[in-house]
Amino acid sequence: MTTETSKYRRDMGTLGVLFIVVNGLIGAGIFGLPEALHGAVGTFAPWLLLIGGTTVMAIVICFIELTKLTDRSGGPQRYVGDAFGAYPGFVIGWTFYAARLISQGANVLVMAAYAAALWPVLGEGFAKVILIILVLGGLTIINVIGIGRVVIVLGAMTVFKLLPLLLLTVIGIGAATHSGPVELPEFSAVEGIALAALYAFVGFENATIPAGETKNPQQAMPRALMAGLAAVTLLYFGLQWAYSHSVIAGTGSDAPLTALAGEYAGDIGAILIAATIVLSVLANLTAGHTSASRIPPSLADDGLLPAWFGKVSRWGTPANSIVFFGVVAILFSLWDDFLALAAVSTLARLLAYISSIAALPKLRQQAGLAPFNTTIIVAAPIALSLSLWAATQTDATQWQALGGFAMVGTLLFFIARRANNAV
C-alpha cells in the first residue's frame, strides 16, 4: 500500500483517535444491557463482558496491523480496495457508509427520546424537529471548520460522560453485596446473550477512517485502538459488577443504570445518569459523523464517486461530503418508518471486519512484508470466526436491505467510472 501526502489537514493526534474509539464503542446500548445480561447469566455477567472485550481484541489487533500499512483515509474501504480492487473496496465502503448514515438518523432519535425524559417538550412535534436539526447541523458545522475542533468538542463530551459512569462504578463496587462465588451459567444461556454482549464492542473501526486527517496515523491509530478497547472493556466490567452485585439486579428494570444511580443517590443520581445517557449518545453521534463523512472523499479520491465529494474546504476538510452526510441524516431522522433498517449497520460492520481481515496478508505482501506474522496467525482465525458467527445471527431482511444498498452503490460506481473514462 502506498503512503502519500494527504490533501487534507492532519489536525488529529492520538488523543483524538482515542476519543473516536471510545465514543464509537459507548453509545446508548450499555445503559440498558446490565439487566439483560444479569437476567441471562447472573453474576457471571461481568466476566462475560470481559471475555467479550478480550475476544473482540483479536479483531482490533488485525485492524492495528492494517493501520500500519497506510496513512490514507477510508478504513475498511481503503484496505479492501487496495487488496482486491476498486469495486470490492467500493461495495464495502458504500454499504458501510449507507448503513452508518441510516443509523445516524436512528441514533439522533434515540438521543431525542432520552432528552425528552429530562424535558418532555422535546419528545414530539416542532421542538423535536428543531432539536434534531440543531444537533446534526451543529455537528456538521464543527466538522467542516476542522477536525481539530471536533477533537476538542469530543474530548469534553468524553470527560463529562465518563466521570458519572466511573463514579457510579466506584460507589457500586464499594456498596456491592456479597454474593459468594461466581456460578458458571449453562452454555445455552451464554449463547443466547453472547451476541448482545458482542454488539457492545462494535464501533472501534470508525477511528480508522479519517487516517488522512490524522498526524502519524500509522503510530497514532494502533495506540488509540488498543488503549480505547482496553479502557472500555474495564469500564463495562466494573459497571456490570456493580450492577450484578446490587439489590437492583434481577428486578427487570428497563433503565438499569438509572435505577442503580437512584438507589445510591436518589432522584439526583437518576437525573445525572439520564443526562449522561443523552451526552453519551451525542458523543457517539459526533464520532459517527466525523468518521462516516470521510468515506465518500476516500472513494472520490480513487475516482469511484464524483470528485465533488472530495473537494477540500479552506479549513482543510472534505466540506461537501460532511454537509451531504449531515443533511441526509436529518432527512432520515424525520422519516419514522425506517428504524428497522438501523440494524443493517451492524451487518455492514461485520462484513467490513471480515473483508478487511481477509485483505491483510495481501496488503502485507504489497508492502514487501511476509503475508503472516505471529500476531496475525494467532489473532486472525479468532477474529474471522467471531465475525462470521455474528454475521450468521442476522436475518434475511438485513441482508436484503444491505443488498439493496449495494445495488444502488453499484449503479453509482459504474456511472462514476464511465464519467472518468470519458474525460
Image (spheres, helix red, strand yellow):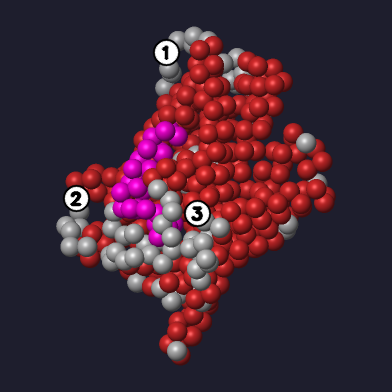
Give the residue at mark 1. Answer: 181
To which residue does mark 2 refer? 373
Percent of width and height locating residue 90? 44, 69
Does residue 268 sit above or below 176 in this rendering?
A: below
Is residue 214 on the magenta stretch? yes
Up/down of 375 relative to 332, above or below: above
Query: Magenta part of the protein: which range?
Result: 210-233
Q: Is residue 266 above or below residue 393?
A: above
What amino acid is labelled 2 in the image?
Answer: Asn
SS assignment for the magenta stretch, majority: helix
Q: Are marks 1 and 3 in contact (CB under 8 Å)?
A: no
Q: Residue 34 location, x and y as percent?
A: 55, 28
Q: Quadrant of the C terminus?
A: bottom left
Q: Check if mark 2's residue and mark 1's residue have beta carbons within 8 Å.
A: no
| Element carrying mark 3 | helix
Disc 3 marks which residue?
147
**x then y, percent, for residue 160:** 57, 33
Q: Residues within 10 Å of mark 2 (few under 14, many from 20)?
A: few
Residue kind at label 1, given as amino acid type:
Pro
